[in-house]
Amino acid sequence: MNVRMLKAKRVERNLRQKDLANALGITEKAMCHKECSEENKFKAAEMLTLVDELNLSFSEFDAIFLIMNLPNV
């Protein structure tokens, strides 16, 4: 997960972690843990809520949540 881009989008939209935590129905501490984790800890429904709250495009969603490391063949 691209934690830098997620945080940048949140800041760009003038939202605090507390704001997103409230939208997701989780604590601010849980939001901080999820936002700061390199591994995607968000549930599918939470990612959809973040798309709405952050007004993410498909390419932004892809860049934040769907980083795939393909093996070298």
Image (cartoon, rainbow, N blue to C red):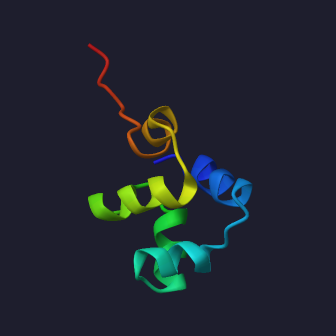
Q: Position of residue 66 (x, y in %)?
A: 38, 40
Residue at the extreme top: 73
Q: Position of residue 67 (x, y in %)?
A: 41, 37
11 is higher (above) or lower (below) than 57: below
Residue 61 in sight from this viewpoint:
yes
Residue at the spot x=63%, y=50% of the render? 4
Q: Position of residue 60 (x, y in %)?
A: 52, 38
29 is higher (above) or lower (below) than 20: below
63 is higher (above) or lower (below) than 53: above
Residue at the spot x=46%, y=53% of the render? 51
Location of the C terminus (image quadrant): top left
Residue at the spot x=52%, y=64% of the render? 35
Residue at the spot x=46%, y=68% of the render? 34
| Quadrant of the image occupied by residue 46 | bottom left
Count of marks placed on residues: 0
Residue 41 in sight from this viewpoint:
no
Q: Is residue 51 left or right of residue 11?
A: left
Q: Position of residue 53 (x, y in %)?
A: 52, 61
